[in-house]
Image (cartoon, rainbow, N blue to C red):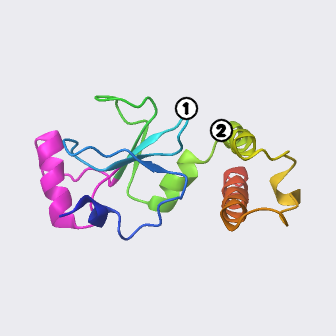
C-alpha cells in the first residue's frame, strides 16, 4: 500500500509538512515548519495493513497500535506523547496550546509582512486567497483550542 493511501481518508491540515522517509515504518508529518512542532505518525485506515504494521513495530499483532501517534521532540526513537484512533481528537491535541498558536500566527505575520491584530478582526481585502484561507483555518483552530 502506498503511504498516500494511509491518510487518503483524512483532511491533512495545509500547514503540516510531510517528513516521511522511505525507511520509516509509517508516514509522518510535522505540524508546522518550526522547531517546536509535533511530529504525527499515521497508520493505515486498512485494518489488515495496521495489523501488519503493529507486528513490525511492536513484535505482536493481537492489540493494534493506535492509528495516530504524536512525538514532541522530532527524532528517531522518541516515545509518543499522545496516541489515539480519532483524527479530531488528534487535531485538538496538537492545536490545543494557545501559546503555540500565538507563536505560529506571529511567524506567519512576519513571513508575509502583515501587521497583526486579533485574527478575527483582521481586514483581509488585500490578502491573497491562500492568506485568507490560512486565516480562516487559523481562527477555527483557535476556537477549537479555546473550547478544550
Seen at 84% across and 46% down, the residue is: 116
The residue under label 1 is 36
Q: Position of residue 112 (x, y in %)?
A: 72, 47
What secondary structure is marked by label 2?
Answer: helix
Q: Quadrant of residue 70?
A: top left
Which one is in front, 29 or 127?
127
Query: Is the residue under label 1 in contact with that under label 2 (CB below 8 Å)?
Result: yes
Magenta-tinted stretch: 41-67
Verify whether residue 49 appears in magenta. yes
Q: Quadrant of residue 110?
A: top right
Residue 62 shows in this picture: no
Query: Position of 28 compared to 31: left or right?
Result: left
Q: Residues within 10 Å of mark 2 (few under 14, many from 20)?
A: some
Which one is in front, 41 or 126?
126
Q: Position of residue 107 (x, y in %)?
A: 69, 39
The residue under label 2 is 100
As drawn, the label of residue 24 is: none
Task: List the single residue furthest toward the bottom.
Answer: 9
What secondary structure is marked by label 1?
Answer: loop
Amino acid at each position: 500500500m502506498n503511504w498516500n493511501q494511509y491518510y487518503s481518508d483524512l483532511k491533512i491540515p495545509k500547514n503540516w509538512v510531510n517528513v516521511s522517509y522511505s525507511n520509516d515504518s509509517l508516514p509522518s508529518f510535522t505540524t508546522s515548519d518550526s522547531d517546536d512542532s509535533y511530529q504525527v505518525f499515521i497508520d493505515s485506515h486498512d485494518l489488515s495493513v495496521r495489523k501488519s504494521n503493529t507486528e513490525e513495530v511492536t513484535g505482536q499483532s493481537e492489540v493494534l497500535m493506535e492509528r495516530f501517534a504524536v512525538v514532541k521532540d522530532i527524532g528517531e526513537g522518541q516515545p509518543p506523547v499522545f496516541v489515539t484512533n480519532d483524527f479530531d481528537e488528534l487535531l485538538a491535541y496538537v492545536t490545543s496550546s494557545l501559546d503555540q498558536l500565538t507563536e505560529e500566527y506571529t511567524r506567519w505575520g512576519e513571513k508575509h509582512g502583515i501587521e497583526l491584530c486579533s485574527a478575527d478582526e483582521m481586514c483581509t481585502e488585500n490578502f491573497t486567497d491562500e492568506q485568507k484561507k490560512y486565516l480562516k483555518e487559523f481562527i477555527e483552530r483557535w476556537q477549537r483550542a479555546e473550547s478544550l
